[in-house]
Image (cartoon, coloured by chain):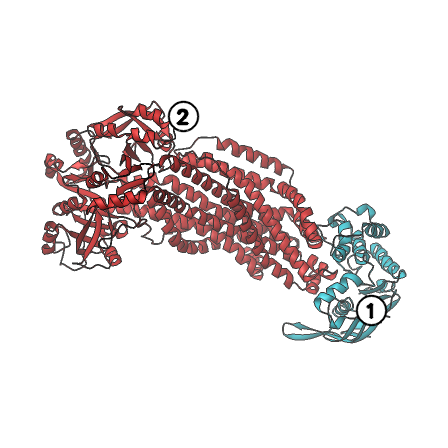
Chain colours: A red, B cyan
Amino acid sequence: MTFLRLFNQAILRDLARNPARTLLTLSGVALGIAVVVAVQLSNDRAIASFSDSMELLNGQADLRISANGRPLDETLMGELAWVWDVGAMTAILEGRVQRIVPGGEAVFGQATIRLFGVDMLSEAPFRTYSTSTDSGGRGDLGLDIDRERFIDLLTSPDALLVPRVLAEEWNASEGDSVNLLAGNREHELSVLAVLNPSGVAEAFDGRIVFMDIAAAQRVMRRTGEIDRIEVVLDDPAMADAVASRIADQLPASVVVDSPEDDAGDAERMTRAFRYNLTALSYIALVVGMILIYNTLNIAVVRRHGEIGALRTLGVSRRAIGWMFLAEALAFGVVGAVAGIWIGEFLARAAGALVSRTLAMLYTGMAGAGSGSGPAPGLYLEMILLGGALAAVSGAGPALRATGVSPIETIRSGMRPRASSRLRPLAGVAALALGAALGLAPAVDGLPVFGYTAGVAFIAGFSLLSPLIIRALTAVVRPVIVRARPVEGTLAVETIQGRLPRVAVAVISLSIAMAMLASMVIMVASFRDTVVVWVDQTLRGDLYVRPAASGRDGANAVAPETLAALDGVPGIEEIDRYRRVDIDYNGFPTTLGAGQFDVVAARAGLQFMDGRGTAEVARDLIGHDRVAVSEPFAVRHGLGRGDSVALPAPEGLRPFEIAGVFYDYSSDGGLVVMDRGTYLERFADEAVSTVAVYLEPGSDAEAVRREITARLDGVRARIATNGELREQILRVFDQTFEVTYALEVVALAVAVMGIANMLAALILERRRELAALRFIGASRRQIGRIVMIESGLVGVLGGVIGLLLGGVLSLLLVYVINFQSFGWTIQFTVPAGFLAQSLAMVLIATLAAGLYPAALALKLDPIEGIRAE
Amino acid sequence: MPVARVSNVTKVYDAEGEPVTAVDGVSMAVEPGQFLALMGPSGCGKSSLLHILGAMDRPTRGEAWIEDTPVHRLTEEELTGLRRTRIGFVFQFFHLLPTLTVEENVALPLLLTNGRGVDRRRVGEILASMGLEHRRASPPGQLSGGELQRTAIARAVVHRPALVVADEPTGNLDSENGRVVLELLAKLTEAGTAVVMATHSAEAAAFAGRTLRMKDGRLQ
């Protein structure tokens, strides 16, 4: 009771007396928490949405039969007729379609929609569909759709079931026509029914359409093919037995598994991306916590006399310590509650970015981030985290408060605490530890030691910051004093004289700046590397792709399109490239096949051992050999001469790795072989992309027009080299939008810290400033002093941030990125961009100085002198 | 010509909406080389009158002059300029800048006046005359109370002001140090500097050549 009263009188009232500073600190913590909440929610919701979608689509199936990326023959259903005795079976065909205006073209960047072809007659045990009009129950077919329309669905070749959300987006009602690009042709299909947002219609946020499988095969031009067979068993306990019987009966290339693995796949393939994003989001939180430390530290110093008085009155050391710790906790918990609230708002903006990035890089489907219900577990976690981190931040100042002697009198304001001699040594030790940790390998594919090394480097720089600040201030002092002899001298003296306190603000700014700088360096290095890679590998003049392709390459270039390429004037050579998505040891992997005779002469893959493409091509052509991408080699620990078992039609077939090449198209991994080998071993003549090489002097636009003219109703996307290159870099740039957004928030929190620190310095120095006014300093000079201090903190934070950022960027490029994604990146320093960032930080800190400067200008010198 | 004079000055403050008259129709003058003590109980208006005499504040009514400059008509910038060149202040709690050394504190008025060209010889002389040469490089935190106030006096006179305004300069010192400080202030007048000192202490006032008593904002 006494403690609470004391807390109220000594702490809460003081916080209420300084509303601006209290609000600044709370805002900093709240923003820090908000960023973590937003990223966590966006990540969780994107993954949950993908997993939920897969679960909804997989329905009640106990088993799934597929051919690891290749189609199955629909006659397989007949061979497995015995399964009907133990359960039910249905066939699925999936594809990607894109809505277009009649006669129009697909729009780049517009997400494709999933087309789900199902056997409506056997759907009942698997999935539920609910139509918008009440049909009076599910009926004996298990579909909540009236019998007449059900018959239409089975017999009509163009009937579509469209989820309501999509129907509304298309402004289409039942009976309306919609034009879709599917199977490289434009189809005018009819909306037979609009599905209520329940069951399968909720999958992928409703960005999915359903057709009867026969109609789907027709529009996808995949007659006789299915992608998988699903099985529901009367007795799910028999799953293993049935699975092994099916596996025994079918070729070894056919995989029988449980659909439950899908959620795990999404989790696994996006894990490194999400972990990196989460690690980044914590930076803003760390900066927020430094703000708490700073505020409390200032409070303890400012209220030295008050604490002494309380001690004289008999308040124990412990009670004093607890009071300040409780203040920190209050900041943490209240900040966390506010942060959760802000985070929910941010999550909507960040959610769209995160889900778009995840879709672009991994899941291939946009439309995640729904299901944005409250997440009480996360909220509680954040409040506990806010409280715990705040307690850690407040422990130092609280401990210092317990050390205030009641006898001690303060003579000339607050004396800065002398810094410990051990500090620099500890700083050097932390840097050495960081370097050692940076050399440690990944743990379970995650750069755990890399992150820890980052923390050690930040700690090292923090501990060394007073030394660095002293050195840097000595360097800039003559410049500042020459420019502004009076204000400059006083500002520099203040910074140097109050080093421990200033150092906290400087280091919080440097951490934010370092993260920004390291990201800027990493992204620029990555981008430069990608540009070089694109230059070397993307040598075709034109690229012909299917009309509506997804990441899985399920849609192939129409045979008519391939035929149309024959004899087009100006075309010298073409490279037919096939890509299929397979599962390799539980990781989604791309199997590619190109014409290596063309590749060797035209495009250059960069092999890690320095060999030329032509040399490796000789090893590949005519042999069961493959070349693998660097991320694949890193993830699976394989190298040249090792063997990989790939899912060929007759079962897993070993291929020798002839070389490892740099590749930045995905972190999932890429295994390529010569097209001749692929045709021989995989019996798949489909082509996913055609690289067209023109004769010297040919006009790419003219050739494109000629190809388009020959297509005659068939659709294809034909991009020039420049267009494709632009698309790749656009996707690349979009990938890092989220990270930049996070950095800006961290910087904003740090700038708040500076405003807070400077404001506290003003209040603490009000007697000094008043004395200065008495002895002839003008208001304007006082304002200038504060602005110079602010600018100096900005320069110091910026420069130290750049130094730390340089170290962290090495860690990001060579350790964290490599261990997370398996990419070797050439290190480049974007000096211009870094200079811009530094200028931005300087402007932000000068802006942060405006509030304390205004505070200083408002100080009444007579009141200031009286305030003893 | 008097160094400072006030004619029928009144100072009214606003205390949470209520007007409070701190100085009420006071007229007086300080001549060059005069050591004037203002005595009176707390709240009698000594400090307010001192602030007007020192061009720190303008009167609500009446006229205040520093030599031939009308303080009551000056803008804030002009008041600042006047203090910088013609007036020195000594405070009860010293108010030295803790991040500056003794020498830097003393040189501050010269820095404010001249910018780059601080006359280091003048600073050295003053430090020597105050017995502070050995403390030249020390920060205020390492000084005794007497040394702190001597530094403050050195800062108040380094720019050769016409008037030194001292508000309870011995209020925070023991009697021995208090005596030294008062002797130093008295010594300033030998060179023609006028000193106006507000004090509670009759002992301190005894060092002054002239004593005025205040009560309820008026001179008695």
Residue A180 rendering spot, x and y as whole percentages: 22, 51
Horizontal arrangement in the rendering, residue A134 relative to residue A856 (left or right) = left
Residue for badge 1 = B67
| Numbered circle sitting on residue A662 | none
Q: Quadrant of the C terminus of chain A?
A: bottom right
Q: Can residue B10 be seen by looking at this rendering? A: yes
| Three-letter code, disc 2 | Asp
The residue at the point 63 percent across, 37 percent down is A422
Name the foreground residue: A766 vs A211: A211
* Residues behind callouts 2 and 1 on a single chain: no
Residue A784 rendering spot, x and y as whole percentages: 65, 57
Name the foreground residue: A405 vs A855: A855
Output the chain of dot 1.
B
Dot 2 and dot 1 residues touching (CB under 8 Å)? no
Q: Can residue A325 be seen by looking at this rendering? A: no
Q: Is residue A200 above or below residue B75?
A: above
Residue for badge 2 = A609
Label 1 SS: loop
Find residue A262 and report its image quarter: top left
Q: Is residue A325 above or below residue A427?
A: below
Task: Report the residue that reaches farthest toward the right.
Answer: B190
Which label sits in the foreground, 2 or 1? Answer: 2
Q: CA distance from mark 2 to mark 1?
A: 90 Å
| Three-letter code, disc 1 | Glu
Q: Is residue B216 above or below residue A592?
A: below
Q: Residues within 10 Å of mark 1 (few under 14, many from 20)?
A: some
Residue A760 rendering spot, x and y as whole percentages: 61, 55
Name the foreground residue: B4 vs A137: B4
Output the chain of dot 2.
A
